[in-house]
Amino acid sequence: SQQGEEDPQALSIQEGENATMNCSYKTSINNLQWYRQNSGRGLVHLILIRSNEREKHSGRLRVTLDTSKKSSSLLITASRAADTASYFCTTYNQGGKLIFGQGTELSVKP
Amino acid sequence: SAVISQKPSRDICQRGTSLTIQCQVDSQVTMMFWYRQQPGQSLTLIATANQGSEATYESGFVIDKFPISRPNLTFSTLTVSNMSPEDSSIYLCSVDGLAGSDTQYFGPGTRLTVL
């Protein structure tokens, strides 16, 4: 079964607006990571948040983690057309393998 | 971080043929991973390749179909054998980050189309 599941599956916003994506997972984790994939290319690592952290920032990105609800959110502020991409949350399963959810497809319209 | 390159970046192949994808890393890494991403889908781990040992395949993937080589700590190949249109996907290699890091770094991917 998928370890991370993103919501919504697709999100369309105007440039300058904020975009929020959510992720849920099933088992206990040491950390959770978010990746971005532009147009079917390779994945770019965005941010890692550890299980003992509740919030983390990186530039226009803000990630929260709620281990009691087994959920995380990624907020992109002041979005740009270049933020158009698919976003994945990932966690490690008990076998130490990185497991991906289905991703959120973000479209930022200029 | 690690810089990873893949060759080819894309290819169009005929049914029944095989394609070998190369993955080169700019530093020595212990573990390399191969993923498949079918159209509109998420990433699925095919196998883990460690230098000096046989690759470990995930459920649903077999060595005859996806033979993997790992001749040294900076290089790996994945072969997609006897291809069918269902093999049309993006294939990505990835590596573990620095020691103590939980981050995996990904190559740019190889987009394969099988006719």
Image (cartoon, helix red, strand yellow):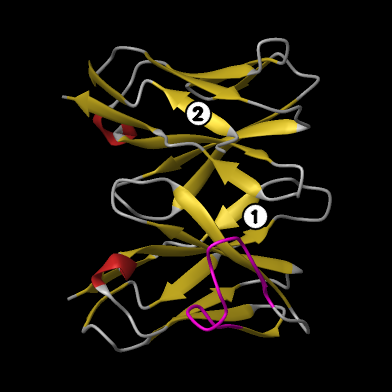
Q: Position of residue B59 (x, y in %)?
A: 59, 60
In screen coordinates, is A23 left or right of B74? left
> Is B84 in front, or is A86?
B84
Q: Which mark, by number, is residue A5?
A: 2
Q: Please rate how many residues cluster around mark 1, counting C-alpha atoms within 10 Å: few if below 14, some from 14 to 19, many from 20.
A: some
Position of A3 relative to B11 (above/below): above
In the image, what residue occupies the spot 24% across and 30% down?
Answer: A81
In the image, what residue occupies the spot 72% across and 81% down?
Answer: B54
In the image, what residue occupies the spot 73% across and 45% down?
Answer: B102
Q: Please rate how many residues cluster around mark 2, counting C-alpha atoms within 10 Å: few if below 14, some from 14 to 19, many from 20.
A: many
Magenta-highlighted residues: B55-68
Q: Which mark, by number, is residue B1?
A: 1
SS majority, magenta: loop
Amino acid tagged 2: Glu
Which quadrant holds residue B112? bottom left
> Is A10 in front, or is B72?
A10
Which structural element holds mark 1? loop
Which structural element holds mark 2? strand
